[in-house]
Amino acid sequence: MPVLVASDLDRTLIYSAAALALTMPDARAPRLLCVEVHESKPLSYMTETAAQLLGDLGDAAVFVPTTTRTRKQYQRINLPGPEPTYAICANGGHLLVDGVSDPDWHAQVTARLADECAPLAEVQEHLLRAADPVWVRKHRVADDLFAYLVVERELLDEDWVKELAVWAENRGWTVSLQGRKIYAVPKPLTKSAAMREIARRTGADLTLAAGDSLLDADLLLAADRGWRPGHGELADTGFTAPSLRALPDRGVLAGERILREFLGAVEGA
């Protein structure tokens, strides 16, 4: 039976220059591979060792990139290893099969959101009205499913984020602060639901997962085994579970460690 590995990407397997956390002496820094270019500029990296490990993992298991990114944002990433058959985008709103969104899955998701949550337009309007232009740089809507703000983190009022979370909770939405982005996402829009669907389709009897943010919590709880790095929202809040291993590694070296853990679990299955 195949093993399914569903992993978050940003700040879990791939890292922006600002998130690399290269705290070692320069001469001992790992060699890096650029895996994403945007507007002709390098944007995301992993270590060369991690790239080799990801290639090995793609050969040994059903590897499923699992991201809050939109389809367009995901498709500019050039991951090493075999091309994944499945990918989860927009926090579970799109299940890609050979790069194409499964229309039946997307229809199921949007129907559930309409039944259980306040509409996106209401949330978007609240963000436009309540966020301070002093620290907001961009307002964005992702695949007509959720909204996020790009902010100047050093100017951000963290109490405002807490107040937003309470407001969203009462409307069936959740809030997550990741780097320079504040996400407002409908609660039923989950990575875990899409992972379960792929496990059903592939017949996988063992599911592994990794992630660093609040939006990854449901994925980690749904998997048979999970890992989180020593940075990010989950580390900051001390998130734990019986099936979860909290790693001390931070930055791009955490991505390498997570891939080693995945491979060890696949080989031991």
Image (cartoon, rainbow, N blue to C red):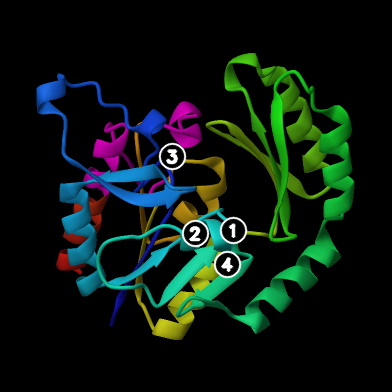
The Cα–Cα distance between marks 3 and 4, rounded to whole angstroms, is 20 Å
Horizontal placement of 123 versus 149: left or right? Answer: right
The Cα–Cα distance between marks 3 and 2, rounded to whole angstroms, is 28 Å
Q: Which residue is mark 2?
A: 74
The Cα–Cα distance between marks 4 and 2, rounded to whole angstroms, is 19 Å
Q: Which residue is mark 3?
A: 240
Vertical placement of residue 176 versus 116, above or below: above
Which marked residue is nearer to the observer: mark 4 or mark 1? Answer: 1
Q: Residue at x 39, y 84 (%)?
A: 203
Judge whether residue 265 can be spotted in this image: no
Which marked residue is nearer to the observer: mark 4 or mark 2? Answer: 2
Q: Which residue is mark 1?
A: 70
Vertical placement of residue 11 versus 101, above or below: above
Q: The disc labelled 1 sits on which kind of residue?
A: Thr
Q: Which residue is mark 4?
A: 193
Vertical placement of residue 162 versus 55, above or below: above
Where does residue 113 sit, x and y in percent of width and height?
Answer: 78, 63
Q: Mark 4 and 2 residues: CB-CB less than 8 Å, in contact?
A: no
Which element carries disc 4, helix, strand or loop?
helix
Q: Residue at x 53, y 62 (%)?
A: 192
Q: Quadrant of the C terminus?
A: bottom left
Horizontal placement of 221 versus 3: left or right? Answer: right
Query: Disc 3 or 4, which lies upstream in sequence?
Result: 4
Q: Is residue 3 magenta?
A: no
Span of residues in magenta:
231-258
Which element carries disc 2, helix, strand or loop?
helix
Q: Residue at x 36, y 60 (%)?
A: 78
